[in-house]
Amino acid sequence: MSTPTSSVSWSLAIAPVQQWIAEARRSRDLLAGSAILSWLMARLLRRVLQADGELTLPELTGEDLEVYAGELFEVLRRERLAYGIPNRASGILHASLDEAETLFGSLEQELASGWEEIRGEVARSARQSARELWAVVGPQVAGAGCPFQALWCVAAGEEHDLEPIDRLFAGVKRARRIAPHQGGAPVPKCGQCGRREAAGGADPADWRRFQSDLEALPEVRLGLRIGVSETLCPVCLTKRFAGYLARGRFPSTSEVAARDWLAAVRSIEDLRSLLRSLEDAGGRVPGFEPDWVDRAPLLFRRSIRRELRAAAERPDAAGVNALEEVERARRKLAAAIQAAERADGERPIPQAPAEYLAVVVFDGDDMGRRVRELRETLPPKVAEFQGRLAQRVNRPGAGAEGDSLASAQPFYLGGDEGLLLAPAASALELAHEVRELWREAMEPLGENAPTLSLGIALFDRERPLGPAIATARAALDKAKERPGKDGLGVTCVTASGSRWTAVREWGRGWEWARQAAEALRSGRLARAWPHDVERFLRSLPDAAWSAAEFAPAAIRREVERLTFRRAVAGEGKRREAGEEVWRRLGGDRWWPEVPPPEDRRQLADQLHVVAFLSRLDQGAGDAA
């Protein structure tokens, strides 16, 4: 029998998180996954606070939780809150240990009832907005069991000592039950999560009939809500339809990829009328809604050509004519862009937006330990960072002003953690801006300030989001494996199948690469520069880096020579242009040092990343 106490410490989380978030093929799946987690976590925390509990972490009030736990998915559109609630929370409960265990033991049922409420809201909305589709899919969603579990621990004690409760929670997390992959039914697995059986029934004949009925629907043939040949389990179907509970349109991956390009085109007066003609033509294509959020794929050459081929195989003369009109309008705009000169002297706009996106994830380094050490001062600074970042992101059109964060679409911002989707060409600049916001927020803590690591995945906009999120997380994990952490990992996955990763610390490790990408983007460096330097560095045997005292300086001198050679300037000003670029790259400060063997290999991979980003800015279909 436990001894009653006046208060107990507690820690609480929902599982799974990373797996659930990564189960996404479309941007709406990512939206729904993030919103569902925040909404459910808010309900659990509200229940604890109503039972005379207090929150130590995160920095949220009861009023905040009331808003987060209110109408489904409204929370992500309320600017005064910052897009999400951290999945882990800790605090104090003024109750006996027995009472605390009873309360937290009941949270599993709270999760189940919340999931049932989500399913009910999905059904209500779908019956109004997608009646025919829901008539086929609805009976399958009715069998979607709750995919979450509550992880919690409580410990007796008057003071909320974070270290013991953290150790106890780590044990609970390791011992949690893991839902097995479903098996046994001779039908396909879900094409999104890969863990559960696809909806349609366990009998192959029943499943084939369900899939046939589904693919016969006009909206499915057009790829609306569900695509042809897409197999989803009841849980992922619930998530897919939950994404449409958010009122108004939500940006597709194509719209996010095209944001900076659209902002640049609209910044030139002579191009606006041609862009409007393209918009008008796109509005007449069957299956595309009259807004760039939904018909953004038509901005890309590859998409138009594919749609034309598909339309030519159907007896749909109106659709073919509309698409041909879109292609003519796109060609006129591309020709005008090629002829236009930027008034600000920057390199001309690409004729089409790049086909690639960036998934950016970030996480504070050693935050559990640092929060225990700085319990009073660190949490408010983390909340300050979250609020500043929330104000800077998702301002389409502002990207033309050189603010990379403005074009980023947030899906989760929870304290020191976050996930953003953004145009790929400015990914390094975006990572720099996120880190600068973190540094500014943490600066008052001085030497005690924790650091921040990031992971980026650069991937084709038409690839499923799930693997890209997993790739970004893997790059983040590699950055955190470095001594001292405080790093950035970037993984490029090209449409042709090439893949490579560069991982370095901040400062000397990535600042030069960011400046090089900017110089290539602005036209101050020729695009051959990263290939020249990479070829030179790869030609050096390891012994050449430290064989003699003069070796580092000699290596630096050759990189400097290659930089001057590839600097772009007017007649007779090559020297001045080279000096300016070299100064921005920080060559005199960074290149003389002899990096360890692993970093020597990473230098070449970083140069490959820089070259990849420079090609993206040309709007190339595959930058490999």
Image (cartoon, rainbow, N blue to C red):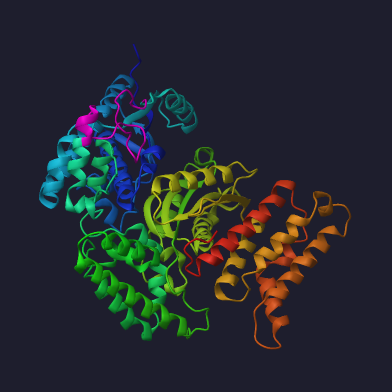
Q: How many discs appear?
A: 0
Closer to us: 378 or 340:
340
State yes or no: residue 186 in magenta. yes
Q: Position of residue 306 (x, y in %)?
A: 35, 61
Locate residue 403: give its quadrant.
bottom left
Q: Residue at x 47, y 72 (%)?
A: 402
Looking at the rendering, the stretch of residues picked out in magenta corresponds to 180-208
Q: Main secondary structure of the magenta part?
A: loop
Q: Residue at x 22, y 66 (%)?
A: 319
Q: Relative to residue 204, is residue 222 depicted above or below? A: below
State yes or no: residue 273 in magenta. no
Closer to us: 272 or 421:
272
Closer to us: 367 or 538:
538
Is 27 left, or right, of 116 in this rendering? right
Q: Quadrant of the C terminus?
A: bottom right
Q: Is residue 146 visible?
A: yes
Is 477 left, or right, of 251 in this rendering? right
Q: Is residue 394 visible?
A: no
Q: Position of residue 187 (x, y in %)?
A: 29, 30
